[in-house]
Amino acid sequence: MLSLRRRNIAAPALLILGGVAGALSAGCGSSSSSSTAHIRGVDLSVNGGTTGVLVNSTAVGGDLSFGQTSAYNFVGQGVSNFSFTTNAATAGTTVGGAATGAVIPPNSQFQLNNGSSYTAYLIGRADVKPLTAIRADPRFLQTVVTGSKGAAANYQGGTPSTPAVVYADPPSGQANLRILNGAPDAGPVDVLIGGKPAFTGVSYPVLPAAVPGNNNAVPAVNPATAYSALPSGTLSVQINAAGTATVLVPPTSIGVGSGQSYTIIVTETAVAPTYSLATETD
């Protein structure tokens, strides 16, 4: 397997597992604190170019390319601003900006809980116009945030509130898995583990409409499924188009450890879609 590193990157890039577009990304550990939260960024955009990471308008990481993960950043509890920057020309004006150097999303606020760790994923396509076409074509470049032991949230502007997410450690000999569909062209997907359906109809995240009278805040949306406990070891993971036998990602071996929690992400690596898997240790 191949591991690529770039400056300011604390976690390895995606590792190619062989076959058709299988991939694995190892997560970056972090010490916990009762008075801070931790957030890292992962670039999984189809054509988002080289990206950087902003926390409270300060650059904390840069030179992320597809599949690369930033270091965890320590931030204060409560509401923080988190964004990606991109050097790609983007199609939108409200969310993605009109030119290179866009901040995605601008003026976003995320509720971060004490001692919790979060991962922000940049997903979608830079060539699709956001918001004005959101109902007909939601594939625009966007940021979605998951929390491993705290709230999972996705906010665009306004003042957020914390959605309730219940987290439990997996039983002995098992691992927690959840799915994030980060492939904008795939449509809903079914996830087969060991040849059997484990998650069905997992949709690409779509930002809901803004709430009138609340500073046009967009409500929280949990982009990932709930965790499911599965036996630890080596799992065979296959992705099908939802409700069909059409294989988007053939059986791919992914190793999971006892007592650990993982997010498996369905990605695509080109505008003419080639689908793949990535996984982050939560």
Image (cartoon, rainbow, N blue to C red):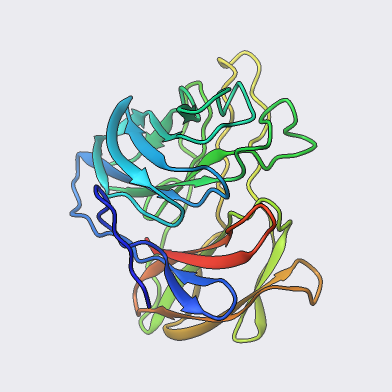
Point out residue 48 in the picture as x, y percentages from the top left corner: 52, 42
Q: Is residue 71 above or below residue 76?
A: below
Residue occupying the point 35% across, 37% down: 53
Decide if residue 62 is on the left or right side of residue 254.
left
99 or 55: nearer the viewer:
99
44 or 79: nearer the viewer:
44
Task: Indicate the quadrant containing the C terminus: top left, top right, bottom left or bottom right.
Answer: bottom left
Point out residue 139 in the picture as x, y percentages from the top left corner: 67, 43
Q: Is residue 189 above or below residue 79?
A: below
246 or 218: nearer the viewer:
246
Residue occupying the point 56% across, 81% down: 19
Q: Is residue 25 above or below residue 121?
A: below
Residue occupying the point 35% across, 80% down: 258
Residue occupying the point 66% across, 83% down: 196
Q: How many marks?
A: 0
Q: Quadrant of residue 270?
A: bottom right
Decide if residue 277 is on the left or right side of residue 9.
right
Point out residue 40 in the picture as x, y percentages from the top left corner: 34, 47
Task: Indicate the quadrant containing the N terminus: top left, top right, bottom left or bottom right.
Answer: bottom left
Decide if residue 42 is on the left or right side of residue 242.
left
263 or 60: nearer the viewer:
60
Point out residue 57 in the picture as x, y percentages from the top left corner: 33, 24
Q: Is residue 81 above or below residue 185?
A: above
Q: Quadrant of residue 109?
A: top left
